[in-house]
Image (cartoon, rainbow, N blue to C red):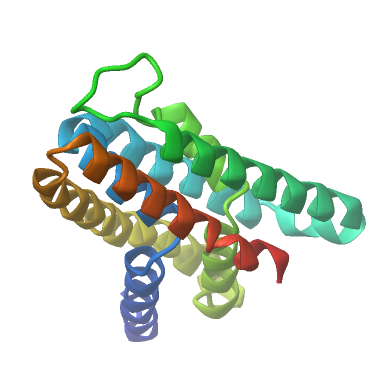
Amino acid sequence: MDPSVVMLMLSAALFCATMTGTPGPNNVLLANSGANFGVKQTVPHMIGIRVGQTSLHVAMLLGLGSLFESWPLLHQMLKYASIGYLIYLAVKIATQHGRNQASERAKPITLVEAAFFQWINPKTWMASISLLSAFTISGDLYWTTAIGGVLVFNIVGLPMSLLWVLIGSSISQKLNTPIRQRNFNWLMAAMLLSTLPMVLV
């Protein structure tokens, strides 16, 4: 393999680790799910993130970005959808009971829900656009580096997601009373709402 491609992919891996490992909507939701439902029940959520992010990434490679240039209103619609869904998720987190108190409302995010969320998650869009613009080589190596970026994002992103779930799961041992569980959920909801400026900028 071309040495320049190898170096570029290593740099892309570092970028992906930063984007998927730092706090954001996905990681707040994963930590919350790990705390309330455990690692096993959060696996579909983790897989859904990768499915959604990959589908968005591929769509951008196939020209999705040009659609927003032609239809600016579509970008505004996406922004408002993102704001609305983040608020909905924050309310859902704040009112859930978790595994310590069985409830029909207390269900982890599904694979499909997590995948859909990536299409309106501002951090996922920012990461995908940055990866495509900064870590691809024009010309004959474009598709090699573009597809390499998709693979790198998934290889790095999955263990980073698991780390946040494990952090949440470890916290669950402290959530041994309804009051602690409720306070934790409210904290996670507030942290999720704190990501709204990412959408508004």
Could you tell whether 187 is left or right of 197 in the image? left
Seen in the picture, residue 71 relative to 101 is either above or below; the reply is: below
Figure label count? 0
Seen in the picture, residue 33 relative to 14 is either above or below; the reply is: above
Q: Give the camera-side residue of 159 and 94.
A: 94
Could you tell whether 176 is left or right of 192 in the image? left
| Point 34% across, 62% down: residue | 152
Q: Residue furthest front?
A: 179
Q: Give the camera-side residue of 133 and 142.
A: 133
- The image quadrant of residue 104 is top left
Seen in the picture, residue 174 relative to 199 is either above or below; the reply is: above
- The image quadrant of residue 1 is bottom left
Quadrant holding the C terminus: bottom right
Residue 90 at least partly seen:
yes
Residue 67 at least partly seen:
no
Q: Position of residue 61 (x, y in %)?
A: 62, 56
Q: Position of residue 78 (x, y in %)?
A: 74, 48
| Point 48% across, 34% down: residue | 92
- The image quadrant of residue 149 is bottom left
Q: Position of residue 190 (x, y in %)?
A: 47, 56
Q: Give the camera-side residue of 90 and 67.
A: 90
| Point 16% across, 43% down: residue | 175
Q: Position of residue 192 (x, y in %)?
A: 48, 55
| Point 76% across, 49% down: residue | 80
Q: Give the camera-side residue of 150 and 181.
A: 181
